[in-house]
Amino acid sequence: MDSNNSNVKSNSADTILIVDDNPSNLQVLFALLESYGFRVLAVQNGENALKIANSILPDLILLDILMPGIDGFEVCRLLKAKSETQHIPVIFLTALSETVNKVKGFEIGGIDYVTKPIEHRELLARIQTHLTLKKMSFSLACQNEKLQQEVYARTRVERQQALVGKITEKIRDSLDETQILQTVTEELVKVLNTDSCQIELYDEKLTMATVVYEYIKEDSKEAPSLHLRYHGKVQQVIEPIYQQLLKKIPSQFVSISSNVNDVQYTKLACPIFENGASKGILGNLWLLKPSEAVFEELEVQLVQQVASQCAIAIRQARLYEASQQQVKELEKLNRLKDDFLKTISHELRSPMSSMQLAMQTLEKLLQSEYPHYKSPKFARVLEIFTSSARRHNRLMENLLMLCYLDVKSEVFTSELINLQIFIPEIIQSFSARIQQQQQNLVIDLPEDLPLLSSHAASLEHIVVELLTNACKYTPAGETIGLQAEFTDQAIELSVTNSGVVIPEKEQHRIFDQFYRIPNNDPWQHGGTGLGLTLVKKMVEVIGASLELESSSGQTKFTIKLPNHHCTSLS
């Protein structure tokens, strides 16, 4: 034996089938291959070759072509026609003197030819090559199958994620709990092809579970539809299954369902709770399949993910419902407050108006009929009564204005306002007061200001209230300014006064109802505490904005009216 061929010994005892009608050839090949560690089978005709190949499935076949009965080509064709034997490598044996159509052999599935007389090293080399190729092919097929399984598993995971995303998309934007429950049950029946899906929700004490929604796939040809047969059914949480569900662990089991004709079903129960949430579960999802079917792991994961999204959607819907109830309660309280203010304002307005009229009459009567009774002290008392009555009337007017402002805002109509005329008319009523209080007045109105489209009465009230505040709190010798400026974005009306600053910590509260800055009324002018509140609301009603700046010895209120309120004078 040639030592150079020792590396072709078979370590795995590969089986080789030799088919040859010549016994001497069989004997030589049998001895040769067996000496190299192969398991060798030998037959002398095609019929026996097919029988052994089908039962033993050898790793390789050495097949003589010219044999009586079924020749080698036919044997090869029959082997390649069957799935069990088609992967067995076939090497044809042919005598050098024989005229053979080798192309035909390759066409019907042969992989190689060896000519007789056979050179041993060549035969061993060819056998080893094709056995190696077969093993490599088998290994590659196994790897391909493994990859296909991995791809299939990954595809299923991606499909599962897509299904969860689809259901989540349908429920995440809904704030209607009923719609959420309906969507989840219907989609799970369709996606998992289950017989039914129920949602039950717990009470606050987690002692009772109530079926709130159910979707059943009928056995008839009709499409699945909502059924209310078990809607509202209450179940006490005492069965062992609920102890597991309350621990947030899903469960799958087979049991007889008394609700569905006493038929056995595979049931999957999955708790509804938010992943990572500290709060307990809200309820459970129940899905039914025929008893011979099971819920695969990916299906259970899908239901768990949907249950988690369902819990989030339910909580959002309940929070929204609670907020809506709070809004309704606030609206109710606001209506009660407005009704109270309207009532009290009307009730107080009448007697205060009568008192003011009586004091005016008394003052005229004293001047005309009893002038000798008039004294500085009496005049001061009368002035106190008059100013107090005027202040209380103003308070009533402001209260009524606050109550009706929202209603009026719907019917306010705009008109064109020429600020060159509008502002001086307002200033005229303050001139005497400013002069008497030894304050300076500066007005800056550019000549090219456009016409302003706004509600004149509201704008007048705003400017008057800001000027009134300026007159109240500007010390003698200081300046009150009113300026208009036209920019690309808006017309800006500013009322400034020097000599006084609003503390920064008070600036954010200056527009609150009934709020007055502590210890910031040295002249004891008093006030209703509603003036700036009304200014803020009216500015919003006319579609403008209001800004406050107070620093470096000056306070400035700026009203900004957007350019769409403006019309060119030309």
Image: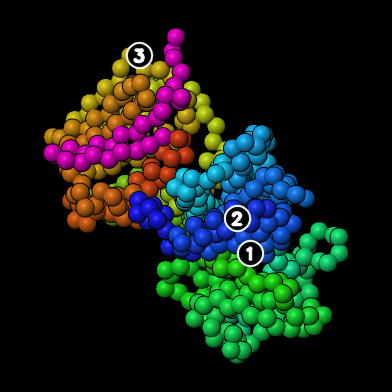
* 461 left or right of 298 in image: left
Whether residues under marks 3 and 2 lie with C-beta atoms below 8 angstroms apart, the answer is no
* 45 left or right of 89 in image: right
State which mark lies toward you, 1 or 3: 1
Could you tell me which secondary element the residue under label 1 belongs to? Answer: helix
Amino acid type, residue under disc 3 in the picture: Asp
Q: How much space separates mark 2 and mark 1, taking CA atoms? A: 24 Å
Q: Mark 1 highlights which residue?
A: 56
Q: Mark 3 highlights which residue?
A: 448
* 204 left or right of 568 in image: right
Q: Is residue 452 or residue 185 the one in the foreground? A: 185
Q: Is residue 364 or residue 391 the one in the foreground? A: 391
Q: Is residue 392 or residue 548 the one in the foreground? A: 548
Taking 413 as reference, is 202 above or below it?
Answer: below
Q: Is residue 209 or residue 246 the one in the foreground? A: 246
Q: How much space separates mark 1 and mark 3, taking CA atoms? A: 110 Å
Residue 567 colored in magenta in the image? yes
Of the numbered discs in the image, which one, if any, rests on residue 557?
none
Quadrant assignment for the C terminus: top left
Q: Residue at x 37, y 26 (%)?
A: 490
Whether residues under marks 1 and 3 lie with C-beta atoms below 8 angstroms apart, the answer is no
User: What range is drawn magenta here?
Assistant: 544-570
Q: Residue at x 22, y 57 (%)?
A: 518
Could you tell me which secondary element the residue under label 3 belongs to? Answer: loop
Q: Residue at x 55, y 32 (%)?
A: 413
Amino acid type, residue under disc 1 in the picture: Ile
Q: Residue at x 46, y 18 (%)?
A: 567
Q: Mark 2 highlights which residue?
A: 24
Crowding at mark 3 (Cα within 10 Å: few <14, some 14-19, many 20+): few
Residue 293 lies, in percent from the top left, at 69, 72
Q: Picture quarter containing residue 410?
A: top right
Residue 131 lies, in percent from the top left, at 50, 52
